[in-house]
Amino acid sequence: MPYHLLTGATGLLGSYLLRDGLHAGHRVAVLARPSRYESAKQRIETILARWERELGCALPRPVVLEGDLSEVDLDLDSPSIEWISRHCNSVIHNAASLTFQGSDPDGEPWCSNVGGTQLMLELCRVTGIRKFHHVSTAYVSGLREGRVLETELDVGQQMGNDYERSKVEAEKEVRGTDFLDTTTFYRPSIIVGDSCTGYTTTFHGFYAPLKLAHTLVSKVVLGVTGGVPLMTELGLCGPERKNFVPVDWISAVMTHIYSRPEHHGKTYHLTSPHPIRVADMTAVIQEAVEKYSTPASPSDEFRCDGAWFKEAFRTELELYRSYWRDDPDFDQTNVTRAAPHLPCPEVNREMLMRSAKYAIGTNFGRPRPRPVKPSFDVHQHLEGLIAAREKLAKTSANGTRVGLQVNGPGGGQWELMLADDRPIAAERGLSPKSTAIFHLNSETFQRLALRRLAVRQAVKTGKVRIEGNGLELPRLEVVLQATALARKNGSTSKSSVG
């Protein structure tokens, strides 16, 4: 089973695509960059730790490739590029900048949305990837009115901002290639939080006026915002419609589509057939900030009045004025045919209030969640075998290989090269060359490594599942025990590769 290479996995939609892809049994590799506080691998571990708490089960770990969409060759080293060429057959390009205005062609949103797409396409060309799944936006429609077809892109429409322009250009870049077998486009409208919990990590779109109102309300007394018609400050009358879609639905539909080749090669409007009225949206904002935010005290001598609130709200949202227009009618022919069993949940006042409550309750993502460090890291435990991976090239291509998939905190996927039923080297990822694959969770692996559990007992009780029968069971048990005791047997080194 080849890998899907996912970009933007540390963003909101990307984290859902990562969760849903792994939960569905896909093999996933992610291209991610480190933050100021965490490595790329640690960022992914923190994301998956949250999903495991919510799902109540251990998830596989993707192969993490540390890179940067703004750098030449994506800042990938040669072994990573070579790994991609051997293991990946499709890209899910989800990473993007949501910057609205940017006249500098070397800045955002152009750098990520156009330049990053060009670099991903070049990676596909070099590595032989022929399937490209591209996350665009429904707002490539610009300022169009009426019905917008999924089959349309540039029909001479006027654009509302540089974000929309950059996404049009990115689609054109993908459509203009001549080396891809299929190109599939996903165009979501305005993404909001989880339809059930309101969870989000990104605070754009609906959250921009909500956050502003939440901030400004701390300067006025309770009740002042009720007399301020927020929709008029957005330049709207009230009946205009905004097309919101919950992030969990988008991910579910995308995962369904990219899992089925018969649906590839089309464009999908991931939009709601029931957009909400602006009057309802602004009513939710006003109700939410008066219910969940902290207003100024009536005794605060520095408190402001409704006129100040109105002027500040209008001035600060000027950048978004073109965004809060009446949305067109987005055609959904392709998405309805591909996923009739996944209708879009209606984003009504109740769901928006849930999203608003979550955003305010988490202070719009500040401070950031603390990084999660697993108590046992299988990668570190195997670092000696990983550092010895050059032996793979020196060993006969007919050498025996087995796969190791460890789910849960600190887990991962590796291919082990064997000599006399002992692992001599390991490389990240699984491949079709493996004669068998061990499946277990990190807790079980740790117990094996500490000799608190025997391999035979783990297999007998179902704590270890073996896929494939290329080797006899007793030999496989020897292999797994030797792998679990790799560090104890002195196969580690101070260097750590991949």
Image (spheres, grey):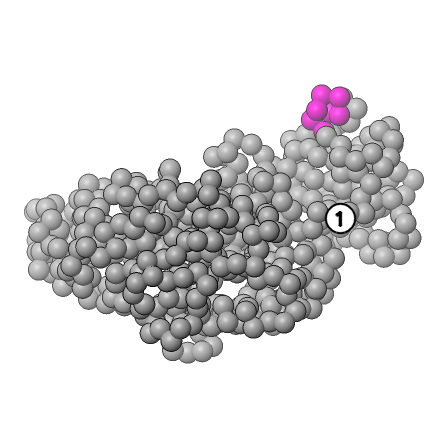
Residue 167 location in percent, x, y?
A: 44, 67
Amino acid of disc 1: Ser
Horizontally, residue 269 falls left or right of residue 430, namely: left
Q: Is 155 one of the magenta-colored residues?
A: no
Horizontally, residue 406 falls left or right of residue 283, namely: right
Nearer to the camera, 386 or 280: 280
Q: Residue at x 46, y 63 (%)?
A: 151
Residue 269 location in percent, x, y?
A: 43, 56
Q: Which residue is drawn at 86% across and 39% down?
A: 422
Q: Is 461 one of the magenta-colored residues?
A: yes
Image quadrant of residue 164?
A: bottom left
Query: Residue at label 1?
Result: 431
Image mark count: 1
Relative to 136, residue 192 above or below: above
Near mark 1 (Cα within 10 A), the count class, few <14, some 14-19 or many ≥20, is many
Q: What stretch is highlighted in magenta?
A: 458-464
Quadrant (top left/top right/bottom left/bottom right) for the C terminus: bottom right
Relative to 32, residue 249 above or below: above
Nearer to the camera, 261 or 104: 261
Relative to 164, residue 273 above or below: above
Image quadrant of residue 71?
A: bottom right
Residue 321 location in percent, x, y?
A: 25, 66
Horizontally, residue 257 falls left or right of residue 223, namely: right
Mark 1 residue element: loop
Residue 353 can be seen in this image: no
Q: Which residue is drawn at 47% across and 35% down?
A: 54
Nearer to the camera, 282 or 341: 341
